[in-house]
Amino acid sequence: MAESAPATRPARSKATSFVRRPDLLDEAVRDRLELIQLTTDPEVGGSHIYMEAPVFTPGSRQFVLQRSGHPHGSDRNDPNHQFLLCDIEDNCSLHPLTDELGTTGPAVSPDGQYLYYFVDETTRRRGNRAILKRVRLDGTERMTLMVIDHDLPGTSFRPSRLYPLATISSDGKRLAISALLTKRVRPEPFGLLVFDLERPSVELIIHGPTWSNMHPQYCRSLDPELGHDILIQENHEQYVNEKGERVRAPNWLGADIHVIRDDGTNFRDLPWGRDGNEYCQGHQCWRGRTGWAITSTQVRKSAEAQLIESLPVPAGGHIGLNTPGGVRNNLSRTFPDPHFHHFATDIAGERFITDAEPFTPEGRIMFARLGEPGRDPLGDWTCIARPRSSGQKSAHLHPFLSPDGTMAFFNSDESGRCQAYMVRGL
């Protein structure tokens, strides 16, 4: 179903207003790197989409960010919120891609042709429906692919409060997003929806009270089998009871991380956390296009935040690092006093970026090299930026890399309002 440009608010023309900010670079790299503030409106802030989201085109020259959002999503009722295309080769110009109210869950197709996104109208006041849309990155051919205003097939649930992150398979045929599920009026568990983009259709593949913060991420591998795997987070420490209330578990061992095939089969575990000493901090990602995954773990005894990579293994009963057959490689073992929380790799799984001490007044962005999976620690550590962020949740740094690994991106509120930044020349 083709549509004209959204009519809820007037479209904005492209803007080029970036500012070079060498003052935020670490002194040791100022002669070879360039740091740019991409969003500069003093009245309306901007931010990058959460760093695990698929926002880049394959050539690493265009990507999607947001106006009037924050590092963890956006306000569905914010009339200023928009997804923007940043064209790096065109002086980092910003081009509006959406103008509807309630947009969320952006995902750029692997071929770089389309932006998929949702319009969340799941509150009764706004129509009680979720809408999946698609638009070309040049702003043309906007289409509504599916409207969910009824129970999901084979269930008595409807999606509500869509998660701010969507994920798309490496072949571009399937898209997934999590949501709170409602049954009549009373809230029910959270679940993961997988959309077949060729039909289109939707299937609820897993649901339950402990999936409130799922962080779904398709494996980026081009292998036909690995390309069906989705990395998901299960928050055992926080769940929804029979009254729809969020409840904290009395015996807290923290979240654990799983992999599930996108048809709901082959549920597996990652050997991280849940032993009473180590627990998952809440961010993980795939290592490039490989089947290896990386997480950050808080360790009580050493008071460290470590980076651990592993392969998924058969489910062992939510026992974390004690899962039988688990392989663990501490990537941060050579870094003194590690405190890492948010991170990402390039598409080749060879370059790595992370925050370090993100809640200090200054903060650091560290760049490193990955060695052999499962064996080598991170090496060639370099501090590339000191973002001077306040450390507030509304301005988390959330660094990530372009697919080719030559550019880094982060958020900061050093100007007084959260804005989006880029480093190039890596």
Image (tube, rainbow, N blue to C red):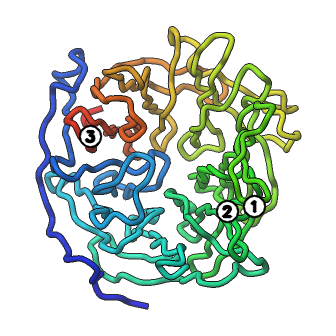
Of the numbered discs 2 and 1, the one sitting upstream in the chain is 2
SS at mark 2?
Answer: strand
- Figure quadrant of the C terminus: top left
Helix, strand or loop for disc 3: strand
Q: Amino acid at mark 3?
A: Met
Residue annotated with mark 2: 192
User: Where 228 sits versus 351, above or below?
Assistant: below
Q: Residue at x 43, y 53 (%)?
A: 73
The mark found on residue 357 in the picture is: none
The picture places residue 152, in percent across and down from the top left corner, at 70, 78
Residues at discs 2 and 1 in contact (Cβ within 8 Å): yes
Q: Earlier in the sequence, mark 3 or mark 1?
A: 1
Is the residue marked by circle 1 packed among few (<14), some (14-19), or many (20+) residues within 10 Å? some
Image marks 3 and 2: residues in contact by CB distance under 8 Å: no
Determine the residue positioned at 47% across, 52% down. 53
Q: Determine which residue is flagged by label 3.
A: 422
**Tag 3 and tag 1, C-beta contact below 8 Å:** no
Foreground tag (3 vs 1)? 1
Q: Amino acid at mark 1?
A: His
Q: Which quadrant of the rendered structure holds the N terminus?
A: bottom left
**Which circle marks residue 207 in the picture?**
1
Is residue 299 in view? Answer: yes
Q: In screen coordinates, is 66 left or right of 123?
A: left
Location of residue 381 with respect to 102 vertically, above or below: above
Separation of disc 2 and disc 1 at Cα? 6 Å
Q: Does residue 114 lie above or below 410 as drawn?
A: below
State the image quarter where residue 381 is shown: top left
- Expressed as whole percent of the image width and height from the top left, the position of residue 207 reads 75, 61
